[in-house]
């Protein structure tokens, strides 16, 4: 009893009482941001490639990330999809927080679709086999269902007729579209595109860019890394400029005018 | 030269046909055995466990550097002798063919393991990364992405090794196989032992080997060229 007559609870007891009021099963918060990057730092030897980089990407929106070569765009993408570790900060994908000092959760692989600069299709598999591999092995879909889903994605990308061809029988643009279909087939939370048009000749650039704009229109959440300012302006609602490891974000496409290097 | 008398006449023709059958059985079985061993050792090489890696390296070091003939002689004559000296009684009979297959598989397996390792190292790391981002687990990545590409990249070298393995089956001559299990060269020796004529059976047998190796080579090279080109062109 205290002097004022009230019962005083010892701090540890108080803490216990408070803890017991927290419900055991917490309802998951609705996902607002598909991706949130906060204070990410990454250093290779003496060189600091990313310095306190932060931005967020709401669901069903597209963020175009531009910057000169060597600015750290690909490094940032590789961090987000769990291919490399980072030195400080944290990444939140959907509701999953990934701090810098923990391993990338194994369950997150397959939640982030990636389209690489070079398509990275599996050369020993046909286009449809490339698309259905993850459906069968990761999503555990039956063969027929995986085939139908894969064909649907290939047709959506306009390469359904090429399903039986091997990658070496496809043009650069067709390969990249198959790669997009492969990434979309697993139904990822967000899609990372790492300069999907950089290895294509000018005729094929528009071919891939049109598909990216279509996907953006359909509400696919995308982080688009590109040197192609035209494509970025058409597809994205917000823009980020990465230079010397620092990142500026804006909804104004005029931000990209600050680029030292001007793409096509 | 009297081929009609020393090759095509009964019972010699039957012996040679049976010998050809045994050559194919030995070549195919030891080829499959060596492929299995090659993949097992490759799995050891790619393992994060140092003990597995050391085991794989040790196997390759021993069986790649050991000449095949002494190995087969040891399995055929040395092993039964050691067995008796230890005091385990008489060496079980009927194991000669199995020991021959084991010796051939162990020898070729060591070469295949090295070829497959080179192939696995030649698979671009970006392929593994792409597979990982698709949600595939490391075991699935090895099975569905790395191994198939490694085999295709090294297809020409693997084809040569399988032809070599088939020709190595002639070393079965030093293994005391039962008469019905002797391979083609052994049957030629058997004919020569009865007729005192070496030329005809040997000319016939070497021609058969030449055709067999050439046919197998064409078949494997056709497969290898297609698969190899597909990987390199992509």
Image: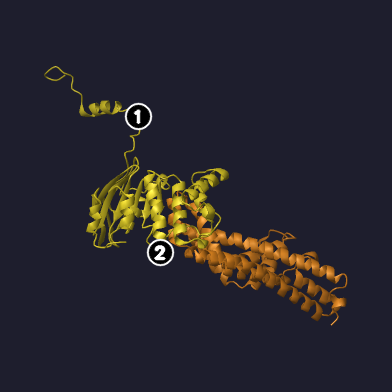
Chain colours: A yellow, B orange
Instruction: Reply above or below: A133 against B67.
Output: above
Categorize mark 2 by other alpha carbons within 10 Å: few (<14), some (14-19), many (20+): few
Residue B22, which numbered label? none
- The number of discs equals 2
Q: What residue did someone put label 1 on?
A: A24
Categorize mark 1 by other alpha carbons within 10 Å: few (<14), some (14-19), many (20+): few
x, y percent for residue B5: 88, 77
Q: What residue did someone put label 2 on?
A: A201
Q: Is B23 or B154 nearer to us in this picture?
A: B154
Q: Please indicate whether residue B95 sits to the left or right of residue A223 in the image.
A: right
Outermost residue on the top side: it is A5
Q: Chain of mark 2?
A: A
Q: Chain of mark 1?
A: A
Q: Residue at 62% of width from left, 69% of height from top?
A: B221
| Mark 1 secondary-structure assignment | loop
Q: Is B182 or A65 nearer to us in this picture?
A: A65
Q: Is residue A38 visible?
A: no
């Amino acid at each position: 009893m205290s002097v004022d007559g009230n019962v005083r609870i010892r701090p540890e007891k108080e803490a216990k009482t408070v803890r017991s009021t927290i419900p055991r099963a917490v309802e998951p918060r609705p996902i607002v941001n598909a991706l949130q990057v906060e204070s990410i730092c990454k250093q290779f030897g003496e060189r600091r490639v990313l310095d306190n980089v932060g931005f967020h990407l709401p669901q069903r929106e597209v963020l175009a990330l531009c910057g000169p070569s060597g600015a750290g765009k690909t490094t940032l993408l590789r961090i987000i999809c769990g291919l490399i570790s980072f030195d400080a900060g944290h990444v939140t994908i959907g509701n999953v927080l990934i701090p810098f000092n923990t391993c990338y959760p194994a369950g997150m692989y397959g939640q982030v679709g990636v389209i690489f600069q070079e398509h990275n299709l599996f050369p020993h598999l046909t286009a449809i086999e490339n698309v259905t591999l993850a459906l069968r092995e990761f999503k555990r879909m039956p063969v027929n269902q995986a085939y139908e889903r894969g064909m649907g994605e290939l047709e959506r990308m306009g390469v359904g007729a090429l399903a039986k061809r091997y990658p070496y029988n496809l043009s650069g643009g067709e390969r990249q579209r198959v790669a997009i279909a492969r990434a979309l087939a697993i139904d990822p939370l967000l899609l990372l595109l790492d300069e999907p048009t950089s290895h294509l000749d000018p005729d094929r650039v528009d071919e891939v860019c049109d598909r990216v704009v279509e996907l953006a229109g359909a509400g696919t959440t995308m982080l688009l890394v590109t040197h192609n300012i035209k494509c970025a302006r058409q597809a994205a609602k917000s823009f980020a400029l990465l230079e010397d490891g620092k990142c500026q974000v804006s909804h104004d496409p005029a931000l990209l005018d600050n680029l030292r290097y001007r793409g096509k | 030269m009297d081929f009609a008398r020393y090759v095509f006449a009964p019972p010699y023709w039957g012996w040679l046909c049976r010998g050809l059958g045994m050559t194919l059985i030995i070549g195919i079985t030891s080829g499959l055995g060596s492929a299995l061993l090659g993949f097992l050792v490759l799995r050891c090489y790619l393992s994060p466990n140092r003990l597995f890696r050391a085991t794989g390296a040790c196997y390759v070091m021993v069986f790649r550097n050991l000449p095949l003939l002494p190995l087969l002689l040891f399995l055929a004559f040395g092993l039964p002798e050691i067995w008796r000296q230890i005091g385990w009684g008489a060496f079980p009979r009927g194991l000669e063919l199995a020991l021959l297959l084991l010796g051939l598989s162990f020898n070729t397996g060591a070469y295949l393991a090295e070829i497959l390792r080179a192939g696995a190292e030649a698979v671009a790391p970006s392929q593994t990364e792409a597979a990982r981002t698709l949600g595939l687990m490391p075991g699935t990545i090895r099975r569905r992405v790395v191994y198939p590409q490694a085999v295709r990249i090294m297809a020409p070298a693997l084809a040569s090794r399988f032809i070599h393995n088939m020709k190595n089956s002639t070393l079965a001559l030093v293994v005391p196989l039962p008469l019905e299990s002797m391979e083609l060269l052994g049957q030629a020796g058997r004919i020569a032992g009865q007729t005192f004529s070496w030329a005809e059976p040997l000319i016939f047998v070497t021609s058969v080997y030449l055709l067999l190796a050439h046919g197998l080579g064409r078949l494997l090279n056709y497969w290898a060229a297609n698969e190899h080109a597909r990987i390199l062109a992509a």
